Image (cartoon, helix red, strand yellow):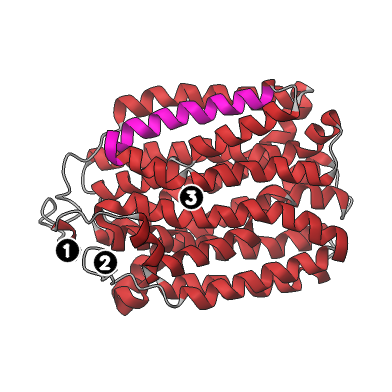
Amino acid sequence: MVEKLPNRTSAIVLIGTVLLAVNMYVDRAAVGQLRGSISNEFGWERDEAAYFIGAFFWAYALGQVPAAALGLRFGFKTVLTVFLVLWSGATILTGLSTTFAVLIASRVALGLAEAGAYPNANALIRGWFPERLRGRACSAVTLGGRLGWAISQFLTPILEVAFSSWRMVLISYGAVGILLAVPFYLLAKDKPSDDLASGTEDPGHPTSDTRDSKPVVELTLWRMLTEPNLIRASLVQFFLNFGWVFLLSDLPSYLTGELGVGKVESGFLSSIPAWVSCLGMVAGGIITDWTARAFGMRWGRAIPIASSMFICSVASFVCPWFSNPLGFVILLSLMAIAADISNPSVWAFSQDIGGRNAGKVLGWVNMFGNIGAGISPVAISMIQREYGWDACFWLFSACFLTAAGVGLGMDSSRKLATAHP
């Protein structure tokens, strides 16, 4: 049985944040498909392209917590709108860049701007949805990101051929984002109070999240560095993103360079994991809401995270034995589905323990995840050159297995408002 959303505004907020996530990932993922053309124009070797890709993730990582703090200070809707305009402008700047320095600067700007998307969307969503619907609401937003990734993988090479220019692709994507900012700002709203999250605004559907009604806990740097729950969640995201980012940054070039696939065919094949991973996002929201009810908050988020990471580990381990392009992509699609089953659990975990600080919690966890993503392209380039691709996939497998073990320790019942630092 499908539950109704709490009210009309919650539906508007949800749709708006989903569209923002779609746009964000379209812009972010496009350079994975355009990497070869950009490298050829600027005469880059593999390492230079890796630094170009990695610059985004470092900026994205470091911008997470400050961006979440801006949302608390100026309002989540306003900050999301500003960041949308900024990352769209950065995408246009990438298309206009004529030097390596400007290209790197545009990627850093894109990372800093997009860093504000998920933490503030997470906090905005939490204000409009009670605990019983959080997993599904979170999965809808992260599903938007995966749709954007899939659209970008499929559409970008087609547009590049149609425009005969990688630059026009990025300029077009940026223009669409700026146009989207207007209706989002006019229609979305911040929750005027925390009543819904504490269960007082939806009397027909009470929620167990009553402890959120306590005063907001100051989430200091020391608290974030020493809180065991946040350490575990951060490590999970670090190891997950280290392995997962291959799909976003290296899969298209792997298909063309290692498996002999053509450019347009590569766009089609590399979009398959993105499309099917949407199933993981949808299933992940349903699963984490069900496990939270069935096993309680201690295990309700940990079980989906640990199980999905184990599946990713097995899939990565056997990758070297798949040389057929379609078979290889199908195996990676299984990994993508499993990885995205864990995503709604991580978002819901941030809301469960963070209360009003949910955006900061997710931002902190995402920061470490994207440090892993920032290290990964450069590490992959070095390891691949010295030891070959097999070693890269086995390293991914070890990272996912570590994430599975650490994920079992995540305790969503341990609220920051009541936990001891």
Residue 211 disc label: 1
**Magenta span:** 72-95
Question: Is 283 rendered above or below residue 138?
Answer: below
Q: Is residue 172 left or right of residue 51?
A: left
Depth check: give the residue in front, 147 or 125.
125
Question: Is 140 rendered above or below residue 354?
Answer: above
Measure how far apart labels 1 and 3 are at the Cα level.
Answer: 29 Å
Q: What amino acid is at disc 1?
A: Arg
Q: Are marks 1 and 2 in contact (CB under 8 Å)?
A: yes
Q: In the rendered structure, does residue 79 fall within the stretch colored magenta? A: yes
Measure how far apart labels 1 and 2 are at the Cα level.
Answer: 8 Å
For image coordinates 36% across by 33% down, the residue present is 79
Question: Is 263 rendered above or below residue 41?
Answer: below
Q: What amino acid is at disc 3?
A: Leu
Q: Residues within 10 Å of mark 3 (few under 14, many from 20)?
A: many
Write down the residue under mark 2.
415
Q: What amino acid is at disc 2?
A: Lys
Judged by its main secondary structure, the magenta piece is helix
Secondary structure state at the residue bearing disc 2: loop
Write down the residue under mark 3.
143
